[in-house]
Image: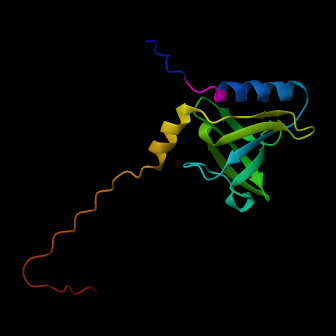
């Protein structure tokens, strides 16, 4: 019986490769994002059919950071600067604005567990009621 080793998702590695390749060819990388995934922070007024396409070219964004867990940056939307956060599980595709060259990312088992955990609400303990004052109420004169 052969057990396959558990592998990390390939999406962040492929995303970085396509991002660099598009920039090296003087193209504008656009990211297609599923805005319905938990923890996605995008300007919701620009979401259409649950998705948003974002220009992630260096000249369009600031504080750009991409790691194995997420893509984050600041950008201006309608003249207003906003912080954007995209978990890797929400990245659907990357393509060039100019010619559409890029790739769609297939579903990956590594993100299924992440999504399951992200959608499971964490139990919130109710706050204890403050203790009731004992004895008679008193009033204080304030001058």
118 sits to left or right of 139: right
Which residue is situated farthest in the left direction here? 135
Which residue is situated farthest in the top direction here? 1
The location of residue 105, given as percent across then percent down, is 70, 34
* 109, 91: nearer the viewer: 109
Which part of the image, by quadrant, shows the N terminus? top left
Q: Is residue 94 above or below residue 54?
A: above
Q: Is residue 10 above or below residue 38?
A: above
The location of residue 50, given as percent across then percent down, is 68, 55
The image quarter in which residue 137 lies: bottom left
Which part of the image, by quadrant, shows the C terminus? bottom left
Q: Is residue 77 above or below residue 33?
A: below
Q: Is 40 inside the magenta-drawn segment?
A: no
Q: How is the image coloured?
A: rainbow
* 124, 141: nearer the viewer: 124
Give the residue at x 74% y 38%: 93
The location of residue 126, given as percent across then percent down, is 28, 62
Give the residue at x 49% y 16%: 5
81 sits to left or right of 135: right
Give the residue at x 52% y 38%: 112
Q: Is residue 14 above or below residue 57?
A: above
The location of residue 102, given as percent across then percent down, is 82, 33
Q: Is 10 inside the magenta-drawn segment?
A: yes
Q: How many marks?
A: 0
The image quarter in which residue 32 lies: top right
Per the rendered image, the range of residues in magenta is: 8-12
Give the residue at x 55% y 48%: 39
User: Magenta part mainly helix, strand or loop?
Assistant: loop
């Amino acid at each position: 019986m052969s057990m396959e080793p558990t592998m990390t998702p390939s999406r962040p590695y492929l995303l970085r490769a396509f991002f660099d390749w598009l920039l090296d060819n003087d193209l504008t990388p656009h990211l297609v994002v599923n805005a319905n995934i938990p923890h996605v922070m995008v300007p919701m007024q620009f979401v259409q059919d649950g998705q948003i396409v974002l220009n992630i070219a260096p000249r369009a964004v600031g504080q750009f950071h991409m790691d194995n867990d997420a893509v984050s940056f600041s950008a201006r939307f309608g003249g207003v600067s906003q912080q954007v956060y995209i978990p890797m599980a929400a990245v659907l595709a990357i393509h060039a604005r100019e010619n559409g060259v890029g790739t769609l990312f297939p579903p990956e088992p590594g993100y299924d567990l992440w999504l399951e955990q992200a959608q499971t609400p964490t139990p919130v303990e109710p706050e204890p009621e403050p203790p009731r004052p004992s004895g008679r109420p008193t009033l204080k004169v304030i001058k």
